[in-house]
Image (tube, rainbow, N blue to C red):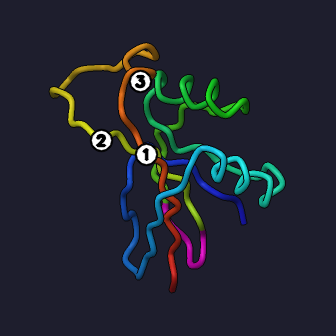
Amino acid sequence: MEIAFLNSLVVTSPGFYKAEKITLDEVKQWLKHYDGRYKSFIGHKSTAQFLQKLLGIRIEQNRKTFRHMKYQKAICFSLYERYPENVLLTQRDLEKARYQFYLLTRLD
């Protein structure tokens, strides 16, 4: 099973979940643990480009719906602040923004 990348901390399927704050280094460790098997569900191009630069791996924009499978892990990129509606953040905006990574695991 691959690890998923999401651009928010979101529950996409009914179930029981565990959400843990993780660091950038821990994100990289999880990628190694999965031997680089991941799929992006990052819906915004600028966020995908920012994460690609930050992680040094290819992160594609993908607006498909993610369905969290049993026991699957997802790395969630979450911004601390809410931005006005219809505002598209640039890579520069994201570099200045406060954010947190989470490891979201479906437990059932």
**Extent of the magenta region:** 67-72
The disc, 1 or 3, on the residue closer to the chain's N-terminal end is 3
Q: State the image quarter where residue 15 is shown.
A: bottom left
Q: Are marks 1 and 2 in contact (CB under 8 Å)?
A: yes
Q: Is residue 98 above or below residue 25?
A: above
What secondary structure is the stretch in magenta mostly built from?
A: loop
Mark 2, other Cα within 10 Å: few <14 / some 14–19 / many ≥20: few
The foreground one among 102 and 64 is 102
The disc, 1 or 2, on the residue closer to the chain's N-terminal end is 2
Residue under label 1, please give it: 100
Residue extending farthest left: 84
How many marks do you count on the picture?
3
Residue under label 2, please give it: 80
Question: How far is disc 1 from disc 3 in space, using C-alphas?
Answer: 12 Å
Left/right of residue 80 with respect to residue 21 in the rendered view: left
The foreground one among 107 and 98 is 98
Residue 88 location in percent, x, y?
A: 31, 20
Q: Is residue 48 above or below residue 108?
A: above
Residue under label 3, please give it: 94
The foreground one among 37 and 80 is 80
Q: Amino acid at mark 1?
A: Gln
The disc, 3 or 2, on the residue closer to the chain's N-terminal end is 2
Residue 28 location in percent, x, y?
A: 70, 47
Q: Amino acid at mark 3?
A: Leu
